[in-house]
């Protein structure tokens, strides 16, 4: 990983830890994007830092917390912008973060958990070494489920990559069971068929 990009990831991690401490609101978080896919051994080029985060209270319903998070991050030299999705948007609340110089224009997209299974996924996060430091990454099964739910072309390529060369932590039986609960079985089976046909 490029040194500047690794530093950006470390900075985002530190900022989230600091804001949680300052506001006295625990904020569990984990990588979910291309970096998470790479952390589990499926090589993927990316310049994006994508995270899933949660808190209690949640900024989804707490405007005061949303404002406090933004103010804290801006005091640290970041540009912070809350993006609200429409009613039927799969991403109802996203915090877009641009890091201060010299890391600008690097930043992160932080998706706030809005479903019970996403909150449970954060409880199963795994510490993985990325570029000489540890960062939390979603368990590979939960990462696959998030990508199946998103359903974009790159998401499905990531799922196939993870299924083609599965990390030891991935349990296919458990993955299939959870996919059935989330009504993602058809999408998972399509990916598995592609992997089997290679």
Image (cartoon, helix red, strand yellow):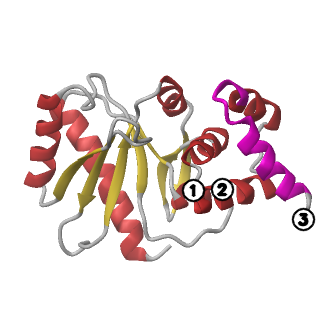
Magenta: main secondary structure = helix
Determine if residue 62 is in view. Answer: yes
Question: Does the magenta run of residues contain 182?
Answer: yes
Comes first in the chain, label 1 or label 3: 1
Residue for badge 2: 156
Mark 1 or 3, which is nearer the eye? 1
User: In this picture, which residue range is highlighted in magenta?
Assistant: 180-196
Viewer-closest of 82 and 13: 82
Q: Are marks 2 and 1 in contact (CB under 8 Å)?
A: yes
Distance CA(mark 1)–CA(mark 3): 21 Å
Q: Nearer the viewer, residue 44 or 197?
A: 197
Q: Where does the image place residue 17, in percent across and percent down from the top left?
A: 29, 42
Residue 61 quadrant: top left
Write down the residue under mark 1: 152
Q: In the shown orientation, is residue 49 left or right of residue 11?
A: right
Asked whether the residues under the numbered discs 3 and 2 touch, taking CB atoms below 8 Å apart as contact, a structural biologist would say no
State yes or no: residue 184 in magenta.
yes
């Amino acid at each position: 990983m490029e040194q500047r990009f690794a530093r950006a990831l470390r900075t985002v991690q530190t900022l989230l830890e600091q804001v949680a401490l300052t506001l006295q609101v625990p904020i569990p978080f984990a990588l979910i994007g291309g970096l998470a896919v790479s952390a589990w051994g499926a090589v993927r080029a990316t310049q994006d830092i994508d995270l899933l985060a949660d808190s209690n209270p949640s900024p989804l319903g707490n405007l005061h917390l949303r404002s406090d998070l933004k103010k804290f991050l801006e005091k640290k030299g970041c540009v912070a912008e809350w993006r609200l999705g429409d009613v039927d948007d799969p991403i109802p609340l996203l915090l877009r973060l641009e890091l201060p110089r010299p890391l600008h224009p690097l930043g992160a997209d932080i998706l706030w958990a809005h479903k019970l299974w996403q909150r449970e996924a954060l409880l199963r996060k795994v510490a993985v070494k990325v570029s000489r430091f540890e960062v939390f990454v979603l368990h590979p099964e939960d990462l696959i489920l998030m990508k199946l739910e998103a359903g974009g072309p790159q998401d499905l390529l990531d799922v196939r990559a993870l299924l083609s060369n599965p990390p030891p932590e991935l349990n296919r039986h458990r993955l299939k069971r959870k996919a059935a609960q989330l009504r993602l079985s058809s999408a998972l089976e399509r990916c598995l068929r592609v992997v089997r046909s290679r």
